[in-house]
Amino acid sequence: MKASAPAKIILFGEHAVVYKKHALVTAVNLRCYAEAKKSSNFRIISPLGVTSLDFEVHPWISCAIKNFIKVKPINGVEIKIESEIPIASGLGSSAAVTVSVLKALDAEFETNLTNEEIYELAKKVEIDVQSIGSGTDPFISTFGGIWLIPERKKLNFKEFEILVIDTKEKSITADMVKKVAELRNKYPEIVDSIFDAIDGITLRAAKMFDEKIENEKISELAFLNQCLLKAIGVSNRKIDSIVENLCKQGIAAKLTGAGGGGCVIAFGNVKSANFENSFIVKPEREGVRLEE
Ligand code: MEV
């Protein structure tokens, strides 16, 4: 059986959400496809290679299978992955692969898991692989749509365009989350004030995304969020130079996801932007689903 799950984009609030502040997140129209076929042994076929259960090459898929085995003991399965989502770029490719694999396993072995149960398993996989995480990525990949986290407020669905510029530098979530945790251990009251400020920005933006998007104000909020992400050390030179370049074209931008590489996003009148390694994505209503 074949399943797919969407990528996600954190519009506002990454990192702060790890400390129970708000994040505004949307699923986007790039998907990861996973096919599960009963087999007498374990085989994983993906753009990263062909392996058995392998926690180095395929940590997310191997952990997804390991957690699924706790629900239904199986002696083997062949998993085949095809993905439209750039890897380690802040767009939630790990969560999308995990969620789509779990849904494909559920269908192939007829375990009738609800999407809530698939999400719970995917959240366990996130903790198994990177020891830390807010569960935001697997949540959005499972349920689709535009959400305010952590209270799970589903916002009115809107069509808008998000410009994504891939720095082509890898973003390793666990490393970046640890880096922020170290800074917070050193300067708790300062870093917590920054998180409070990010929280305020996210709540203002969420209100606008739920009601009427005002491009100028959203751009100002994106600029403020980016400055605060830079303050906690998750921007880098490439991100800064892309943000600055877009700023010269009159477009406000910020990093998305864990940072330290990965992607920069911009909203508003982004059609005019001229950038290499860039593409436009749109919010996606549908979360994980079975494919024909
Ligand atoms: C990663 O996409 C977003 C972070 O906030 C980590 C998390 O929420 O688990 C950096």
Image (tube, rainbow, N blue to C red):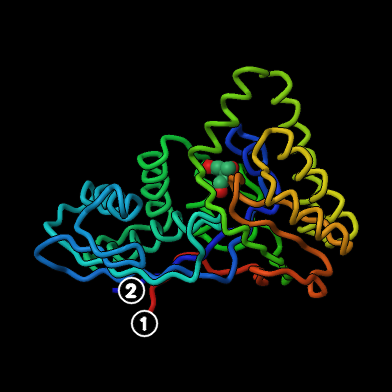
Q: Residues within 10 Å of mark 1 (few under 14, many from 20)?
A: few
Label 2 amino acid? Lys
Q: Is residue 16 above or below residue 25?
A: above
- SS at badge 1: loop
Give the numbered dot on residue 292.
1
> Residue 102 at what x, y percent from top left?
33, 59
Residue located at (81% from left, 46% from top):
204
> Residue 283 at what x, y percent from top left?
64, 67
Instruction: Confirm or deny contact between disc 1 and disc 2 (CB under 8 A).
Output: yes
Image quadrant where residue 187 sits: top right
82 or 290: nearer the eye? 82
247 or 156: nearer the eye? 247
Image quadrant where residue 33 sits: bottom left
Residue located at (66% from left, 45% from top):
23
Q: Quadrant of the N terminus?
A: bottom left
Residue located at (33% from left, 73% from top):
2
